[in-house]
Every structure is written in C-alpha cells, then in structure tokens.
Image (cartoon, rainbow, N blue to C red):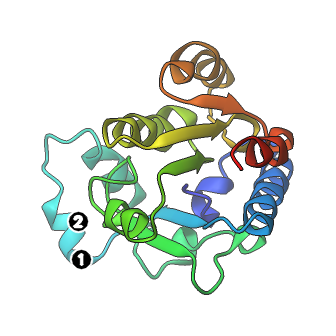
C-alpha cells in the first residue's frame, strides 16, 4: 500500500524495502494468490470533498497538486508495478477501505486473508489493519515490507499492537505460511 513514487522517495533504504516487497509479490503470485495495490491520489472533486477540519486536509494542502491522480508522484513504483488482473484502487484517505471499493473487489474474488505491506506502518498499514479486522479478514503483516518515518513507532506497532489483530511475519516467512494453509 502506498508504494508509489512520491511516498517511496521519503523512506530511508527504500531500495532494499522495495526489493523485499517485490520478493513478497513474486511469492504470492507463485502461490496463485492475488496481488492488490492501493495508492493515494486525488481528482478535482476529491480535493473539494475533504472537510477543512480533517486531519488529512493540511497534508493534502501542503502537497499542492503533487498528488493529482495523473501525477508521476502517485504512480506505483515500477519495481513493484501492477500486472493485468491485479486489484488497483485509488484512495483519498489514510486507510485502504473507506474511500475505495476494495472490500467488494476482495469479496468478489473470494479473498478472506490479506497480507499487508505498506508505507507507512503508523498510517495506511494501521488504518487498513484495523478496518480489515473489523471486516473479519484474516491478516498477515509483513514487518520487513512495511516502513515508517519513525522506526521506533514501527517497532512498537509490530511488537505490541499488530499481534492483537494479525499475524506478524517477514517476507522470508511467506513460503512457509502458504504451506501451512494448504
């Protein structure tokens, strides 16, 4: 989630992070799983729909039009780019569900387990995990395929918060997780 050019560029050691995400995607595809992408991007009507009191409003205002839907900044990083048949949604809030049809697309495909990776651990990953849990998905969070600008926050979430609603694993754990669920 949010593995788009303008967000990836904000993360330290982004090349290694994106390489791990590419490995995770390859593993999921190799096991016959579906891959989904969530990106934040705005169209004209989306800008007008953000209430001034929203915590998201100042972030969007500070970015100007950098996050326009057709901007290269909002494009998914080429190293992990979607393929034909992948799920791709455009969001206008922090979480992956509230402003998208992601839940419907997942349900239409019979998907009941999500493997989450994203930037940022305290933003899109946290919001999506909580919402997905409320929607009764089984959840795996790939700790080393997520990043946050604050490494301490990332660590606390992975060790103390996420295990309450998800299985926290690594990209290297993925093949074993698929074997366990067959």
Question: Tags 2 and 1 in contact by the CB under 8 Å rule?
Answer: yes
Q: Residue furthest front?
A: 182
| Closer-to-camera residue (182/34) | 182
| Closer-to-camera residue (98/72) | 98
User: Could one spot residue 72 in this view of the protein?
Assistant: yes
Tell me the residue at 32%/66% (across/down). Answer: 104
Residue 6 appears at what percent x and percent y? 59, 61
Residue 136 appears at what percent x and percent y? 36, 40
Dot 1, crowdedness within 10 Å: few (<14), some or many (≥20)? few
Q: On the rendered structure, is 38 left or right of 118?
A: left
Residue 34 appears at what percent x and percent y? 60, 67
Q: Quadrant of the N terminus?
A: bottom right
Q: On the rendered structure, is 124 left or right of 47?
A: right
- Looking at the rendered structure, the secondary structure element under dot 2 is helix
Q: On the rendered structure, is 68 left or right of 61?
A: right
The residue labelled by disc 1 is 44
Q: How many numbered circles does the render carry?
A: 2
Residue 112 appears at what percent x and percent y? 47, 52
The residue labelled by disc 2 is 47
Tell me the residue at 49%/62% (across/down). Answer: 38
User: Could one spot residue 65 in this view of the protein?
Assistant: no
Q: Quadrant of residue 46?
A: bottom left
Tell me the residue at 66%/19% (across/down). Answer: 155
Q: Residue furthest bottom?
A: 84
| On screen, residue 21 above or below 86 | above
| On screen, residue 87 above or below 94 | below
- Looking at the rendered structure, the secondary structure element under dot 1 is helix
Dot 2, crowdedness within 10 Å: few (<14), some or many (≥20)? some
Tell me the residue at 68%/69% (across/down). Answer: 77
Checking the image for residue 111, the label placed there is none
| Closer-to-camera residue (35/92) | 35
Real-space Cα distance between discs 2 and 1? 6 Å
């Amino acid at each position: 989630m949010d593995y788009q050019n303008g967000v990836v560029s904000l993360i330290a050691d982004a090349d290694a992070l994106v390489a791990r995400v590419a490995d995770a995607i390859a593993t999921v595809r190799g096991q016959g799983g579906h891959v989904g992408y969530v990106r934040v991007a705005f169209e004209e009507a989306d800008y007008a729909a953000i209430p001034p009191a929203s915590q998201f409003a100042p972030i969007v205002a500070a970015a100007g039009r950098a996050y326009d839907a057709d901007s290269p900044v909002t494009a998914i990083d080429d190293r992990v780019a979607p393929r034909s048949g992948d799920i791709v949604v455009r969001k206008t809030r922090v979480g992956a569900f509230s402003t998208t049809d992601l839940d419907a697309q997942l349900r239409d495909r019979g998907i009941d387990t999500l493997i989450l990776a994203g930037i940022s651990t305290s933003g899109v990953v946290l919001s999506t995990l909580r919402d997905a849990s409320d929607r009764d998905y089984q959840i795996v969070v790939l700790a080393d395929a997520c990043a946050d600008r604050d490494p301490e926050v990332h660590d606390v979430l992975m060790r103390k918060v996420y295990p309450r609603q998800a299985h926290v694993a690594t990209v290297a754990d993925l093949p074993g997780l698929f074997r366990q669920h067959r």
